[in-house]
C-alpha cells in the first residue's frame, strides 16, 4: 500500500542553508531518488511549483525518494543579499541574471545532499525551464536518467545530448514562448538515440491544467526505463 510522507530538510552551505522537502513512500525501499529543480526564481521558481508538486507525488508513489528545494533567497532558504532591481533588469532583457551560476551551484549542492542521504542511490534529475539547464550542469555520468521539462534552449547554453548522455525525456509544449518548435526540433535532431521527446499540443511553457499529464509522463518514462534495464 502506498503511503506518501513529506519532510522538510535543510541543505547546509558555507554560512547558511537551502530549504528543501523530501517526499517518499514509507513502505518502499529507498533505492531510487529524484532531484526536482525549479524554474528561475524571477519566473516564480519555487519548490512548490504546481508542475513540480505533481511530479513529486507521481514519482514518490512509484517508490522514488524525491527532493525539491528552494534556491538561495527563496522561501526559507538563506543566502547573501542580491541587487534585485539590477538582476531583474538583466533577466528580462537577456533571459539571464548575474546570480545564475550561484543557482546552478545550489542545484549541485542539492544533488550532493540527495546522493549522500540516500546512500548514493541512482538519481534522476528533473529540471523545469531554467531548472532544465541546471539539470544539464550536473555531472551527467552520475545520473541514472534525465528529464527536461520546457528546456530553455534558446536562452541558455545547453549541451548537445550526445553519447554519454543518460536516458533522457524532453517534455515540450507546442506553444512554449521560450522555445519555438523549430528550435526544439533542430536540437532534438542532433540528440542521441536514447533521448526522446513528448510534445503537448495544447500546452505552453507553464502546462496549466496539464500538470498531472506531465507528471504521469515522467513516471511512465522511469517505469519504461526500468523495464529496459
Image (spheres, helix red, strand yellow):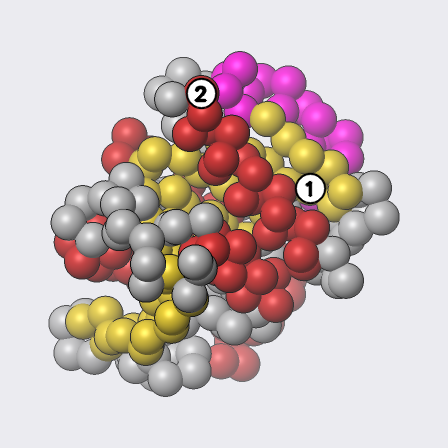
Secondary structure type for disc 1 = strand
What residue does disc 2 label? 228
Query: Relative to 94, is 38 on the left or the right?
Result: left
Residue 79 vs residue 131, the one in the foreground:
131
Q: Is residue 179 above or below residue 52?
A: above
Q: Nearer the viewer, residue 120 or 228?
A: 228
Residue 228 appears in the figure = yes
Give the residue at x 64% y 31%. 197
Give the percent coordinates (x, y) of residue 220: 56, 38
Residue drawn at (73%, 37%) of the image = 199
Assign the N terminus to one quadrant of the image: bottom left
Question: Where does label 1 land, which residue?
Answer: 172
Say which residue appears at 29% left-offset and 59% top-offset. Answer: 110
Q: Is residue 37 magenta?
A: no
Between 95 and 168, the one lying in front of the other is: 168
Q: Spot the residue most to the right.
A: 202
Q: Is residue 12 left or right of residue 34?
A: left
Residue 2 position (above or below residue 187): below
> In front: 156, or 9?
9
Q: CA distance from mark 1 to mark 2?
A: 24 Å
**Image vertical order of residue 121 relative to residue 53, above or below:** above
Residue 187 location (% of width, % of height): 62, 26
Q: Is residue 114 left or right of residue 154?
A: left
Place of residue 71 in the rendered image (x, y in percent of width and height, measured from the top left) = 39, 69
Look at the picture and state if 29 lies above or below 20.
Answer: above
Residue 194 lies within the magenta run:
yes
The answer to whether one can see residue 103 in this image is: no
Q: Residues within 10 Å of mark 2 (few under 14, many from 20)?
A: few
Q: Which residues are the magenta region?
A: 178-195
Looking at the image, residue 179 sits to the left or right of residue 101; the answer is right
Amino acid at each position: 500500500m502506498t503511503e506518501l510522507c513529506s519532510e522538510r530538510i535543510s541543505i547546509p552551505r558555507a554560512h547558511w542553508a537551502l530549504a528543501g522537502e523530501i517526499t517518499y513512500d514509507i513502505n518502499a525501499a529507498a533505492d531510487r531518488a529524484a532531484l526536482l529543480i525549479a524554474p528561475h526564481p524571477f519566473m516564480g521558481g519555487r519548490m512548490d511549483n504546481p508542475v513540480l508538486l505533481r511530479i513529486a507525488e507521481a514519482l514518490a508513489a512509484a517508490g522514488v525518494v524525491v527532493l525539491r528545494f528552494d534556491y538561495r533567497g527563496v522561501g526559507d532558504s538563506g543566502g547573501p543579499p542580491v541587487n534585485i532591481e539590477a538582476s531583474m533588469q538583466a533577466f528580462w532583457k537577456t533571459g539571464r541574471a548575474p546570480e545564475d551560476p550561484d543557482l546552478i551551484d545550489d542545484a549541485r549542492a542539492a544533488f550532493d545532499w540527495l546522493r549522500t542521504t540516500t546512500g548514493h542511490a541512482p538519481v534522476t534529475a528533473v529540471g523545469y525551464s531554467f531548472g532544465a539547464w541546471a539539470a544539464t550542469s550536473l555531472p551527467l555520468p552520475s545520473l541514472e536518467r534525465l528529464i527536461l521539462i520546457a528546456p530553455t534552449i534558446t536562452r541558455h547554453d545547453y549541451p548537445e545530448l550526445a553519447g554519454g548522455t543518460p536516458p533522457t525525456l524532453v517534455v515540450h509544449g507546442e506553444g512554449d514562448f521560450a522555445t519555438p518548435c523549430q528550435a526544439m526540433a533542430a536540437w532534438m535532431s542532433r540528440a542521441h538515440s536514447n533521448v526522446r521527446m513528448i510534445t503537448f499540443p495544447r500546452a505552453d511553457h507553464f502546462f496549466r491544467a496539464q500538470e498531472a499529464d506531465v507528471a504521469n509522463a515522467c513516471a511512465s518514462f522511469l517505469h519504461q526505463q526500468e523495464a529496459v534495464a
